[in-house]
Amino acid sequence: MPKRISALTDEQISQAILKQKIYKLHDGFNLILRASPNGTKTWVASFYFESQRKYMFFCSYPRLSLADARVLNIDIRKQVDHGINPIDSNKIQIAAENEQRDVIESCPRISIAWMVRVKYGNGASLCVFPEKKPYS
């Protein structure tokens, strides 16, 4: 019979002792809080997809609450039940959000350049507003 794991509480998480090695606190349903020696506590969801154990890391504990981590874990389990790899799904979602952000950031440049052309004619230069450099 599998070992029964009691659910974590916010008090248990905040009182987690720093150790010299990484250790794990289990919440149940394969939701794990990974505590590092440097003090970071990271949420990890483990799941089986296509007969392989996979891990998906979330934010650290203060940024992502216990309740929110449980909701994300439920979403991951639903995706696995429907035959969707949550890691690939997350990559696609991040790429779509980045593309949308790029479009939104370029809109002011395009509209200002259009206003310059309308005001000064089609011969006006579009180089009035240089493009933003990528994050470095």
Image (cartoon, grey):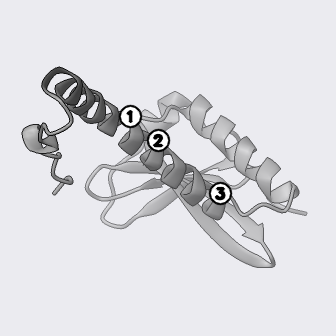
Asked if residue 76 is positioned above or below residue 9 in the image, the reply reads below
Q: What residue is drawn where x is 15% and y is 57%? A: 136
x, y percent for residue 102: 37, 44
Of the two numbered discs 2 and 3 on the same chain, state the one appearing first in sequence: 3
Q: Is residue 57 left or right of residue 135?
A: right
x, y percent for residue 28: 71, 48
Give the number of the disc on residue 104.
Answer: 1
Between 116 and 72, the one nearer to me in the picture: 116
Dot 3: few (<14), some (14–19), or many (≥20) neighbours within 10 Å? few
Q: Which residue is mark 3?
A: 89
Q: Is residue 65 left or right of residue 92?
A: left
Of the two numbered discs 1 and 3 on the same chain, state the one appearing first in sequence: 3
Residue 127, quarter of picture: top left
Judged from the image, the secondary structure of the residue bearing numbered disc 1 is helix
x, y percent for residue 76: 71, 50
x, y percent for residue 66: 56, 33
**Farthest-out residue, top:** 119
Disc 2 to disc 3: CB gap under 8 Å:
no
| Amino acid beneath label 1 | Ile
Give the number of the disc on residue 100.
Answer: 2
Q: What residue is drawn where x is 58% and y is 32%? A: 68
- Foreground: disc 2 or disc 3: 2
Whole-angstrom CA distance, mark 2 to mark 3, is: 17 Å
Judged from the image, the secondary structure of the residue bearing numbered disc 2 is helix
